[in-house]
Amino acid sequence: MSFASNVKDELIRLPLGKNCCMLSELSALTQTSGSLSLRGGGRVRVTWRVESAALARRIFLLIRSRLGLTPTLHFVQHNRLGGQRTCVLTLEDQDAEKLLLALHMMEQDETGTISLKRTAPRHSMTRQCCRRAFLRAAFLGSGTMSSPEKGYHFEWIAADDALCQTISRLLEKSGLPVHEHVRKGQHVIYLKGAQQIADALTLMGASGAMLQMENVRIQKQMRGEANRASNCDEHNTERMVTASQQQVDAIKLISIHRGLSSLPPALEQIARARLEHPDLSLSELGQMLEPPVGKSGVNHRMRRLQMIADEIMQEEPLNRSKEELP
Protein backbone atom coordinates (compact mmCIF):
# COMPACT_ATOMS: atom_id res chain seq x y z
CA MET A 1 0.00 0.00 0.00
CA SER A 2 1.11 3.57 -0.67
CA PHE A 3 1.71 5.99 2.19
CA ALA A 4 -1.46 7.90 1.25
CA SER A 5 -3.44 4.64 1.42
CA ASN A 6 -2.03 3.94 4.89
CA VAL A 7 -3.10 7.41 6.03
CA LYS A 8 -6.64 6.90 4.70
CA ASP A 9 -6.83 3.45 6.27
CA GLU A 10 -5.96 4.96 9.65
CA LEU A 11 -8.53 7.76 9.25
CA ILE A 12 -11.28 5.35 8.21
CA ARG A 13 -10.75 3.34 11.39
CA LEU A 14 -11.29 6.34 13.68
CA PRO A 15 -14.51 6.40 15.78
CA LEU A 16 -17.46 8.20 14.17
CA GLY A 17 -17.54 10.90 16.84
CA LYS A 18 -20.32 13.25 17.89
CA ASN A 19 -23.49 13.99 15.90
CA CYS A 20 -22.15 17.33 14.67
CA CYS A 21 -18.91 15.70 13.52
CA MET A 22 -20.74 12.92 11.71
CA LEU A 23 -22.77 15.52 9.83
CA SER A 24 -19.55 17.37 8.93
CA GLU A 25 -18.09 14.15 7.53
CA LEU A 26 -21.26 13.47 5.53
CA SER A 27 -21.15 17.00 4.17
CA ALA A 28 -17.55 16.59 2.96
CA LEU A 29 -18.06 13.10 1.54
CA THR A 30 -21.20 14.21 -0.29
CA GLN A 31 -19.28 17.07 -1.92
CA THR A 32 -16.25 14.94 -2.86
CA SER A 33 -17.80 11.55 -3.67
CA GLY A 34 -21.55 12.14 -3.99
CA SER A 35 -23.91 13.20 -6.74
CA LEU A 36 -27.49 14.49 -6.72
CA SER A 37 -30.09 13.35 -9.27
CA LEU A 38 -33.46 15.06 -9.78
CA ARG A 39 -36.19 12.92 -11.32
CA GLY A 40 -39.79 13.43 -12.34
CA GLY A 41 -42.42 14.19 -9.73
CA GLY A 42 -39.94 15.96 -7.46
CA ARG A 43 -38.14 12.72 -6.62
CA VAL A 44 -34.45 12.90 -5.70
CA ARG A 45 -31.59 10.47 -5.42
CA VAL A 46 -28.18 10.83 -3.75
CA THR A 47 -25.39 8.51 -4.84
CA TRP A 48 -21.84 8.03 -3.51
CA ARG A 49 -19.21 6.29 -5.65
CA VAL A 50 -15.95 5.25 -3.99
CA GLU A 51 -13.23 2.75 -4.86
CA SER A 52 -12.53 1.75 -1.26
CA ALA A 53 -14.87 -0.77 0.37
CA ALA A 54 -13.71 0.48 3.77
CA LEU A 55 -14.72 4.05 2.90
CA ALA A 56 -18.09 2.81 1.58
CA ARG A 57 -18.63 1.08 4.92
CA ARG A 58 -17.82 4.29 6.80
CA ILE A 59 -20.31 6.28 4.70
CA PHE A 60 -22.90 3.58 5.35
CA LEU A 61 -22.29 3.75 9.12
CA LEU A 62 -22.37 7.56 9.14
CA ILE A 63 -25.76 7.65 7.41
CA ARG A 64 -27.25 4.93 9.59
CA SER A 65 -25.82 6.23 12.89
CA ARG A 66 -26.54 9.94 12.32
CA LEU A 67 -29.83 9.81 10.39
CA GLY A 68 -31.17 6.32 10.99
CA LEU A 69 -31.25 5.62 7.25
CA THR A 70 -30.01 2.55 5.38
CA PRO A 71 -28.57 3.22 1.91
CA THR A 72 -28.50 0.47 -0.68
CA LEU A 73 -25.09 -0.81 -1.67
CA HIS A 74 -23.95 -2.45 -4.89
CA PHE A 75 -20.71 -2.88 -6.79
CA VAL A 76 -19.76 -1.97 -10.34
CA GLN A 77 -16.98 -3.90 -12.09
CA HIS A 78 -14.91 -1.96 -14.65
CA ASN A 79 -13.54 -4.32 -17.29
CA ARG A 80 -11.59 -1.55 -19.00
CA LEU A 81 -9.73 -0.66 -15.79
CA GLY A 82 -8.29 -4.07 -15.08
CA GLY A 83 -11.33 -5.31 -13.21
CA GLN A 84 -11.34 -2.40 -10.76
CA ARG A 85 -14.46 -2.34 -8.58
CA THR A 86 -16.45 0.73 -7.52
CA CYS A 87 -18.72 0.74 -4.47
CA VAL A 88 -21.99 2.59 -5.00
CA LEU A 89 -24.27 3.67 -2.15
CA THR A 90 -27.70 5.14 -2.89
CA LEU A 91 -30.46 6.97 -0.99
CA GLU A 92 -33.73 7.63 -2.81
CA ASP A 93 -36.96 9.58 -2.36
CA GLN A 94 -37.87 10.21 1.30
CA ASP A 95 -34.55 8.94 2.67
CA ALA A 96 -32.67 11.20 0.27
CA GLU A 97 -34.88 14.13 1.32
CA LYS A 98 -34.03 13.53 4.99
CA LEU A 99 -30.34 13.67 4.19
CA LEU A 100 -30.69 16.81 2.06
CA LEU A 101 -32.71 18.51 4.79
CA ALA A 102 -29.99 17.67 7.34
CA LEU A 103 -27.34 19.10 5.01
CA HIS A 104 -29.47 22.22 4.35
CA MET A 105 -29.71 21.42 0.66
CA MET A 106 -33.52 21.24 0.89
CA GLU A 107 -35.99 23.20 3.01
CA GLN A 108 -39.52 22.64 4.23
CA ASP A 109 -42.02 25.50 4.36
CA GLU A 110 -44.95 26.01 6.74
CA THR A 111 -47.24 23.85 4.62
CA GLY A 112 -44.81 20.94 4.74
CA THR A 113 -43.73 21.32 1.11
CA ILE A 114 -40.11 20.34 0.56
CA SER A 115 -38.09 22.06 -2.14
CA LEU A 116 -34.48 22.05 -3.27
CA LYS A 117 -32.57 25.03 -1.91
CA ARG A 118 -28.99 24.43 -3.15
CA THR A 119 -26.99 21.71 -4.86
CA ALA A 120 -24.08 21.64 -2.38
CA PRO A 121 -24.20 20.92 1.38
CA ARG A 122 -24.08 23.87 3.70
CA HIS A 123 -23.18 22.82 7.22
CA SER A 124 -22.08 25.18 9.98
CA MET A 125 -18.67 24.21 11.37
CA THR A 126 -18.06 26.59 14.25
CA ARG A 127 -16.48 23.92 16.45
CA GLN A 128 -12.91 22.74 16.03
CA CYS A 129 -14.02 19.09 16.14
CA CYS A 130 -16.35 19.68 13.17
CA ARG A 131 -13.60 21.38 11.17
CA ARG A 132 -11.28 18.44 11.84
CA ALA A 133 -13.99 15.99 10.77
CA PHE A 134 -14.69 17.88 7.53
CA LEU A 135 -11.02 18.07 6.52
CA ARG A 136 -10.58 14.39 7.36
CA ALA A 137 -13.56 13.32 5.26
CA ALA A 138 -12.59 15.64 2.39
CA PHE A 139 -9.16 14.00 2.34
CA LEU A 140 -10.78 10.55 2.33
CA GLY A 141 -12.94 11.58 -0.62
CA SER A 142 -10.50 13.56 -2.75
CA GLY A 143 -7.12 13.85 -1.07
CA THR A 144 -3.69 12.36 -1.60
CA MET A 145 -0.12 12.81 -0.47
CA SER A 146 3.32 11.76 -1.63
CA SER A 147 5.49 9.33 0.28
CA PRO A 148 7.81 11.24 2.64
CA GLU A 149 10.67 9.17 1.24
CA LYS A 150 10.19 10.96 -2.10
CA GLY A 151 9.05 14.43 -1.02
CA TYR A 152 6.54 16.43 0.97
CA HIS A 153 3.29 17.17 -0.82
CA PHE A 154 -0.25 16.95 0.58
CA GLU A 155 -3.37 18.00 -1.34
CA TRP A 156 -7.14 18.08 -1.62
CA ILE A 157 -8.80 18.20 -5.07
CA ALA A 158 -11.96 20.33 -5.17
CA ALA A 159 -14.39 19.93 -8.05
CA ASP A 160 -15.95 23.38 -7.52
CA ASP A 161 -15.22 26.81 -6.04
CA ALA A 162 -17.47 26.27 -3.01
CA LEU A 163 -15.56 23.23 -1.77
CA CYS A 164 -12.23 24.91 -2.52
CA GLN A 165 -13.19 27.94 -0.45
CA THR A 166 -14.46 25.78 2.42
CA ILE A 167 -11.27 23.72 2.66
CA SER A 168 -9.08 26.83 2.40
CA ARG A 169 -11.05 28.62 5.11
CA LEU A 170 -10.87 25.66 7.49
CA LEU A 171 -7.12 25.29 6.96
CA GLU A 172 -6.55 28.98 7.63
CA LYS A 173 -8.60 28.77 10.83
CA SER A 174 -6.43 25.85 11.89
CA GLY A 175 -3.25 27.89 11.33
CA LEU A 176 -2.06 26.08 8.21
CA PRO A 177 -0.82 28.11 5.19
CA VAL A 178 -2.92 27.55 2.09
CA HIS A 179 -1.58 27.13 -1.44
CA GLU A 180 -3.89 26.79 -4.44
CA HIS A 181 -3.61 26.17 -8.15
CA VAL A 182 -5.76 24.79 -10.97
CA ARG A 183 -4.92 21.43 -12.54
CA LYS A 184 -6.94 20.18 -15.51
CA GLY A 185 -9.84 22.45 -14.62
CA GLN A 186 -9.96 21.38 -10.96
CA HIS A 187 -8.94 23.39 -7.92
CA VAL A 188 -6.08 21.90 -5.89
CA ILE A 189 -5.42 23.00 -2.31
CA TYR A 190 -2.04 21.80 -1.14
CA LEU A 191 0.49 21.95 1.68
CA LYS A 192 4.27 21.91 1.25
CA GLY A 193 6.86 21.21 3.89
CA ALA A 194 7.19 18.42 6.41
CA GLN A 195 6.02 20.43 9.41
CA GLN A 196 2.84 21.68 7.71
CA ILE A 197 1.95 18.15 6.59
CA ALA A 198 2.67 16.73 10.03
CA ASP A 199 0.35 19.36 11.54
CA ALA A 200 -2.37 18.45 9.02
CA LEU A 201 -2.08 14.74 9.83
CA THR A 202 -2.33 15.49 13.53
CA LEU A 203 -5.30 17.76 12.94
CA MET A 204 -7.19 15.05 11.05
CA GLY A 205 -6.36 12.39 13.63
CA ALA A 206 -3.73 10.36 11.74
CA SER A 207 -1.21 10.37 14.61
CA GLY A 208 0.32 7.03 13.56
CA ALA A 209 1.05 8.30 10.04
CA MET A 210 2.45 11.52 11.49
CA LEU A 211 4.94 9.60 13.67
CA GLN A 212 5.92 7.43 10.71
CA MET A 213 6.54 10.52 8.59
CA GLU A 214 8.61 12.10 11.38
CA ASN A 215 10.80 8.98 11.52
CA VAL A 216 11.37 9.16 7.78
CA ARG A 217 12.19 12.87 8.01
CA ILE A 218 14.79 12.27 10.76
CA GLN A 219 16.39 9.48 8.73
CA LYS A 220 16.53 11.70 5.63
CA GLN A 221 18.13 14.52 7.61
CA MET A 222 20.74 12.19 9.04
CA ARG A 223 21.56 10.77 5.60
CA GLY A 224 21.71 14.26 4.14
CA GLU A 225 24.08 15.48 6.83
CA ALA A 226 26.30 12.45 6.36
CA ASN A 227 26.41 12.94 2.58
CA ARG A 228 27.19 16.64 2.91
CA ALA A 229 29.96 15.91 5.36
CA SER A 230 31.57 13.30 3.10
CA ASN A 231 31.30 15.39 -0.08
CA CYS A 232 32.24 18.77 1.32
CA ASP A 233 36.02 18.77 0.80
CA GLU A 234 38.06 21.93 0.63
CA HIS A 235 38.16 22.13 -3.16
CA ASN A 236 34.40 21.83 -3.62
CA THR A 237 33.76 24.37 -0.89
CA GLU A 238 36.13 26.90 -2.42
CA ARG A 239 34.62 26.41 -5.87
CA MET A 240 31.05 26.82 -4.54
CA VAL A 241 31.98 30.00 -2.63
CA THR A 242 33.68 31.48 -5.68
CA ALA A 243 30.72 30.73 -7.94
CA SER A 244 28.29 32.12 -5.39
CA GLN A 245 30.28 35.35 -5.07
CA GLN A 246 30.35 35.78 -8.85
CA GLN A 247 26.58 35.34 -8.93
CA VAL A 248 26.09 37.87 -6.15
CA ASP A 249 28.34 40.41 -7.93
CA ALA A 250 26.41 39.97 -11.19
CA ILE A 251 23.06 40.41 -9.42
CA LYS A 252 24.28 43.57 -7.63
CA LEU A 253 25.42 45.00 -10.94
CA ILE A 254 21.98 44.40 -12.47
CA SER A 255 20.33 45.90 -9.37
CA ILE A 256 22.41 49.09 -9.58
CA HIS A 257 22.00 49.74 -13.32
CA ARG A 258 18.53 48.35 -14.11
CA GLY A 259 16.86 47.28 -10.89
CA LEU A 260 15.82 43.71 -10.06
CA SER A 261 12.18 44.56 -10.76
CA SER A 262 13.09 44.91 -14.45
CA LEU A 263 13.86 41.19 -14.62
CA PRO A 264 11.32 38.51 -15.60
CA PRO A 265 9.58 37.08 -12.50
CA ALA A 266 11.56 33.82 -12.54
CA LEU A 267 14.91 35.64 -12.70
CA GLU A 268 13.89 38.21 -10.10
CA GLN A 269 12.86 35.43 -7.72
CA ILE A 270 16.18 33.56 -7.98
CA ALA A 271 18.18 36.80 -7.85
CA ARG A 272 16.58 37.90 -4.56
CA ALA A 273 16.95 34.40 -3.13
CA ARG A 274 20.70 34.36 -3.95
CA LEU A 275 21.25 37.77 -2.34
CA GLU A 276 19.49 36.59 0.82
CA HIS A 277 21.27 33.21 0.91
CA PRO A 278 24.74 33.53 -0.67
CA ASP A 279 26.01 30.42 1.15
CA LEU A 280 23.46 27.90 -0.18
CA SER A 281 24.14 25.45 -3.00
CA LEU A 282 22.12 25.59 -6.22
CA SER A 283 20.03 22.58 -5.14
CA GLU A 284 19.25 24.07 -1.72
CA LEU A 285 18.49 27.43 -3.30
CA GLY A 286 16.06 25.82 -5.75
CA GLN A 287 14.13 24.10 -2.94
CA MET A 288 13.41 27.48 -1.35
CA LEU A 289 11.55 28.72 -4.42
CA GLU A 290 7.79 28.43 -4.91
CA PRO A 291 7.33 26.14 -6.75
CA PRO A 292 10.68 24.37 -6.12
CA VAL A 293 13.19 24.28 -8.99
CA GLY A 294 15.85 21.62 -9.63
CA LYS A 295 19.59 22.25 -9.70
CA SER A 296 19.73 22.44 -13.51
CA GLY A 297 16.86 24.97 -13.57
CA VAL A 298 18.61 27.19 -11.01
CA ASN A 299 21.88 26.93 -12.94
CA HIS A 300 20.11 27.96 -16.17
CA ARG A 301 18.63 31.05 -14.48
CA MET A 302 22.03 31.99 -13.04
CA ARG A 303 23.59 31.81 -16.50
CA ARG A 304 20.90 34.15 -17.83
CA LEU A 305 21.61 36.61 -15.03
CA GLN A 306 25.33 36.46 -15.83
CA MET A 307 24.58 37.18 -19.51
CA ILE A 308 22.55 40.26 -18.53
CA ALA A 309 25.41 41.43 -16.30
CA ASP A 310 27.87 40.92 -19.20
CA GLU A 311 25.63 43.04 -21.47
CA ILE A 312 25.67 45.84 -18.89
CA MET A 313 29.47 45.67 -18.68
CA GLN A 314 29.70 45.98 -22.46
CA GLU A 315 27.31 48.94 -22.51
CA GLU A 316 29.17 50.89 -19.83
CA PRO A 317 32.28 51.78 -21.93
CA LEU A 318 30.02 53.02 -24.76
CA ASN A 319 28.04 55.20 -22.37
CA ARG A 320 31.20 56.67 -20.90
CA SER A 321 32.55 57.45 -24.41
CA LYS A 322 29.34 59.31 -25.30
CA GLU A 323 29.56 61.35 -22.11
CA GLU A 324 33.13 62.38 -22.91
CA LEU A 325 32.24 63.71 -26.40
CA PRO A 326 31.99 67.57 -26.63
Image (tube, rainbow, N blue to C red):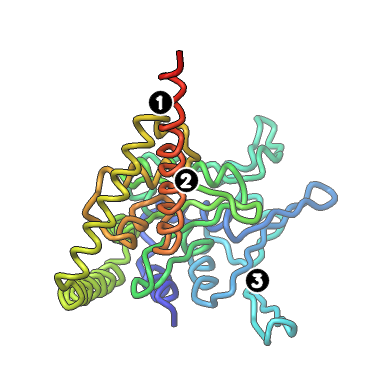
- Nearer to me, 33 or 256: 256
Local SS, label 1: helix
Which quadrant of the rendered structure holds the N terminus?
A: bottom left
Q: Earlier in the sequence, mark 1 or mark 3?
A: 3
Q: Nearer the viewer, mark 3 or mark 2?
A: 2
Tell me the amino acid under the disc marked 3: Val
User: How packed is label 3: few (under 14 Cα within 10 Å), some, or many (20 or more)?
Assistant: many
Residue 218 visible? The answer is no
Q: Separation of disc 1 and disc 3 at Cα? A: 78 Å
Q: Nearer the viewer, mark 1 or mark 2?
A: 1
Q: What's the residue at 62%, 66% (across, down)?
A: 71
Local SS, label 2: helix
Tell me the amino acid under the disc marked 1: Arg
- Nearer to me, 60 or 256: 256
Tell me the amino acid under the disc marked 2: Ala
User: Is 35 left or right of 298, judged from the image as shown?
Assistant: right
User: Is 11 left or right of 230, judged from the image as shown?
Assistant: right
State the mark number for residue 81. Answer: none
Q: Quadrant of residue 161?
A: top right
State the mark number for residue 88. Answer: 3
From this view, report whether residue 163 is shown above or below residue 195. Answer: above
| Residue picked out by circle 1 | 320
Which quadrant of the rendered structure holds the C terminus?
A: top left
State the mark number for residue 266. Answer: 2
Local SS, label 3: strand
User: How packed is label 2: few (under 14 Cα within 10 Å), some, or many (20 or more)?
Assistant: few
- The residue most toward the front is 326
Q: What's the residue at 44%, 39% (across, down)?
A: 314
